[in-house]
Image: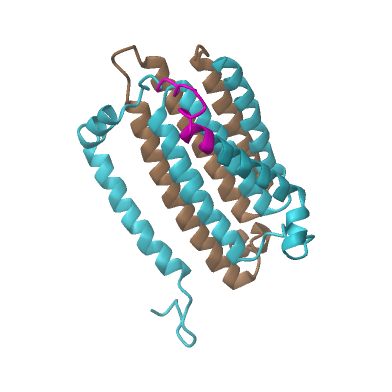
């Protein structure tokens, strides 16, 4: 594929921006977690684009894929803990809207 | 050709990502996220990252999104079945038609790929080696990055314990704050 790596970076930036938008705008905690996943995916794409940029034929740069694997592991842990928290909160409040939880607001 | 695919898939991935943000029901958000992840996986493949493409499908689409779907269905948040009555109603809805079409397409592709010789076709040439070969990844992961790798394994163990503690139903009569 002859696409320059900059275009991969632009795609990652757009996906990250959409993730931030959803993270700030949506009130459903589950959808907020999904937007975090979207942002982590954009970060992965950035890692891989950088790795592709710095690879020369015969001598691939593998730092990007290795860190992308770490990001995937962290994302799995984050999703598991986040969803466990959602289940615990749902048991307490019978809702997943973040507006329902305002005890710490002062 | 691959360039055209890349730009089309990029546009599709962005559209699906917008769908995640704009969808009303969490169920539709998850399905849009699935679409976005699949598009990204093919983009990884086009960019030469074969292992990452497989990991994207197996770990993200196969494990994390199933976890999301599981929680949404557990909490009964998906209102996707509101306007379908019974099996026939579900079969009539547009989504089911698309699903059946995709299933038939996958089946046909499988049949053709298995019976290539019978149809007088030659199997496609295998893909050139990508950037992230398994040997290279394993050498890096268990060599230079062995310590972060072990740290991640500790993190996953801690996560597992935390999830069990958080999601466990409290027994009636016991107060979580006292124990």
B23 relative to B16, above or below: below
Residue B125 is covered by the magenta coloring: yes
Provide the residue span drawn in magenta. Answer: B110-126
Q: Nearer the viewer, residue B75 or A74?
A: B75
In the rendered view, does B121 fall on the left or right side of B108?
A: left
From the rendered image, report the letter of the chain displayed in brown. A
Q: Nearer the viewer, residue B84 or A22?
A: B84
From the rendered image, report the letter of the chain displayed in cyan. B
Q: Residue furthest bottom?
A: B173
Q: Residue at x 45, y 72 (%)?
A: B168
Magenta: main secondary structure: loop
Tag count in the figure? 0
Percent position of residue B119, x then y: 52, 27
B106 relative to B129, above or below: below
Residue B92 is covered by the magenta coloring: no
Residue A27 seen in this snapshot? no
């Amino acid at each position: 594929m002859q696409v320059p790596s900059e275009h991969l970076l632009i795609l990652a930036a757009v996906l990250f921006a959409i993730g931030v938008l959803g993270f700030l705008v949506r009130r459903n905690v589950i959808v907020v977690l999904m937007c975090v996943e979207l942002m982590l995916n954009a970060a992965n794409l950035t890692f891989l684009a950088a790795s592709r940029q710095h690879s020369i034929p015969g001598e691939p740069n593998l730092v990007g894929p290795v860190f992308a694997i770490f990001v995937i592991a962290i994302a799995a842990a984050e999703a598991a803990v986040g969803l466990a928290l959602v289940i615990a909160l749902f048991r307490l409040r019978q809702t997943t809207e973040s507006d329902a939880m305002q005890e710490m607001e002062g | 050709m691959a360039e055209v695919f890349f730009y089309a898939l990029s546009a599709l991935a962005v559209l699906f990502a917008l769908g995640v943000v704009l969808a009303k029901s969490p169920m539709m958000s998850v399905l849009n996220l699935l679409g976005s992840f699949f598009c990204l996986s093919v983009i990884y493949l086009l960019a030469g990252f074969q292992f990452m493409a497989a990991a994207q499908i197996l770990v993200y689409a196969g494990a994390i999104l199933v976890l999301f779907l599981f929680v949404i269905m557990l909490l009964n948040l998906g209102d996707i079945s509101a306007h379908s009555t019974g099996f026939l109603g579900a079969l009539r809805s547009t989504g089911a038609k698309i699903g059946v079409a995709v299933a038939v397409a996958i089946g046909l592709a499988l049949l053709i790929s298995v019976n290539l010789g019978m149809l007088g076709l030659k199997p496609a040439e295998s893909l050139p080696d990508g950037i992230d070969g398994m040997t290279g990844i394993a050498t890096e992961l268990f060599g230079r990055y062995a310590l972060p790798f072990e740290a991640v394994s500790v993190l996953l163990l801690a996560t597992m314990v935390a999830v069990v503690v958080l999601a466990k139903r409290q027994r009636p009569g016991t107060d979580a704050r006292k124990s």
